[in-house]
Amino acid sequence: MRKIWKTKPKINEECKLLAEKSGISLILAQILINRGIHSPADAKKYLNCDLNDTHDPFLLKDMPLAVKHIKNAIKLKKNIFVYGDYDVDGLTSCAVLSNVLKQLGANVSCYIPHRVDEGYGLNKQACARIKQQGADLLITVDCGISAFEQVAYSHSIDLEVIITDHHQPVGKKVPRALAVINPFQAGCDYPYKHLAGVGIAYKLACALVGPEQDISENLDLVALGTICDVALLTGENRILVKHGLEKLSQTKRIGLQALKDVAGINNKKVEAYHVGFILGPRINATGRMGSAEKALELLLSADYSQAIVLAQGLDNENKQRQKEEAKTLRQALAMIDKEINFKTDKAVVLHNDAWHPGVIGIVASRITERFYRPTILISTKDEIAKGSGRSIRNFHLFETIAQCDHLLEGFGGHEKAAGLSILKHNIESFKQSFNQMASSSLLPEDMMPMIAIDMQIPLSALTETLINEIEKCAPFGMGNTRPLFSSVDLKLKGSPKVLRANGFKMWITDGQVTCEALASNFMDIDINHIQDGFSIVYSPSINDWQGIHTIQLKLKDMQFS
């Protein structure tokens, strides 16, 4: 699929001034300006990533109320339940808040709903069971902002509720809980709106202990949940994740030590990649395939012999998840060949009785990447079918689904990812409505992937010093992507070498400098017919082989004259 290359404006006087006043290179100054950082003060704050630059948790609306009720419950020895979600964000939220509540002397338990049997969010049956177990106060994490009926029911059975959530409220109203902590709710002036569920839980924990007590050891969990929820790595999130990754690299948490051992990364510096593609999928696996209780048990474990057994179990579940995902992807691609006409269909909506609801979100993401269309996959195993969707730029998935609420039993999510529940007989009507809205709002260029390029530079501009300077922009992720460069009019030196896992390696030159370039996949390129004069988009890195450092380019795309 052809991609649009969009290069930011060239270095200008503002860039030169920022570089001079900040003591950084022109290239790094351009990168910062591309990310909306224009002043030396903001550049210093961005590059230093100081924990002291995070915001006061009491700026969150209802935080004083929440703290008051929770401290009172602890004082009166009431039973507190933390009610989470079955994904990594929800599980880490549960672990953070329950850990701190226990430190404060609370009687606290956790409840994670079963993905298949109960579905996402608060449900009445769970509230009734929790009350039967003696609960007095229920605190939601990573869910609850749209649970109007469930919160009302909880009050009717004398179970008080405090909501902490980061999802978009439906309209301006929120459930009538003791307190609602959500930066998106009306009247909340919190400066940073994009905290993950675990970030909100951590803020509540910080408010409960006060500034005198350091609970930053929990940032390893905050980094896990924030990265795996694909939250923006900007502002406060980036600060929390940067420090969290440092904690995670040397974590004292027994469960995470065991998981790192099983995953083979215990002696490595943990970066966002390891969280998103190695640790996160293993924690997510049990929740995707059934119950997430084992994953939460691992995060809370204090015994290594128990933790290693749990970690191995999660690893096995992840392998099973991968098999189920591959099978579902094959089936979905076959259905696309038969049912979808990309000349007329600007969105993909598919349903199947055989699909496991725990993997359809991942598969929807794969299809979105491949065809660059908003995609919703629906598992129709049960009468109330469950769907999961992923989106592209310029198409707000949550807002679009909200316009179909008359056809749905429930829905929730974000701009780029959302979930829904729907009766089977409404699926065709939903499919038509969703496709009509996609057709009316998406332009042809919206359905072409865009690569945002920081600068066009010659290969000779790349040095080890520059690459190390660029790493100060880490951690990289949504909203703070790894800087990309383009270089033009290049020539091939020798023949490309095919690598395992559908990738290739080649040596390229601009006539002055020669670099090794790696591609993780073929990018729809016939490597046997690469002709001189090509251009590339890439991220530069340092390859350390037997103590020898060389510059290596990780290819994102190629174009030919």
Image: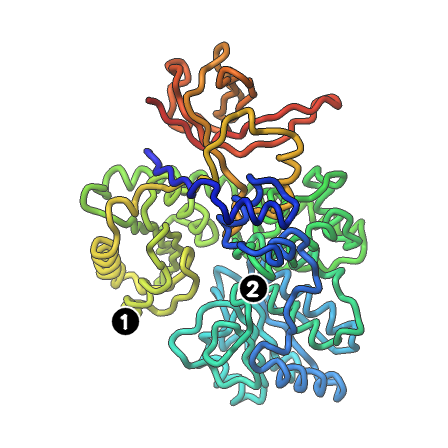
| Residue 406 numbered tag | 1
Residue lying farthest to the left in this orientation: 344
Q: Is residue 128 visible?
A: no
Choose between 40 and 161: the one closer to the eye. 40
- The answer to which image quadrant residue 139 occupies is bottom right
Q: Name the colour scheme.
A: rainbow
Q: Is residue 227 visible?
A: yes
Badge 1 or badge 2: first in the primary sequence: 2
Tell me the amino acid under the disc marked 1. His
Judge the density around disc 1: few (<14), some (14-19), many (≥20) Cα neighbours within 10 Å.
few
Judge the density around disc 2: few (<14), some (14-19), many (≥20) Cα neighbours within 10 Å.
many
Instruction: Give coordinates of residue 313: x percent, y percent.
Output: 66, 47
Q: Where's the N terminus, which quadrant? A: top left
User: Is 549 on the left-hand or right-hand side of 351?
Assistant: right
Q: Secondary structure at mark 1?
A: helix
Choose between 94 and 191: the one closer to the eye. 191
| Residue 195 numbered tag | 2
- The image shows residue 503, relative to residue 112, as above or below, that is above
Tell me the amino acid under the disc marked 2. Leu
User: Is 487 on the left-hand or right-hand side of 210?
Assistant: left
Q: Where's the C terminus, which quadrant? A: top left
| Residue 293 numbered tag | none
- The image shows residue 195, relative to residue 43, as above or below, that is below
- The image shows residue 302, relative to residue 172, as above or below, that is above
Instruction: Give coordinates of residue 217: x percent, y percent.
Output: 76, 60
Instruction: Give coordinates of residue 379: x percent, y percent.
Output: 38, 54
Choose between 521 and 410: the one closer to the eye. 521
Residue lying farthest to the top in this orientation: 494
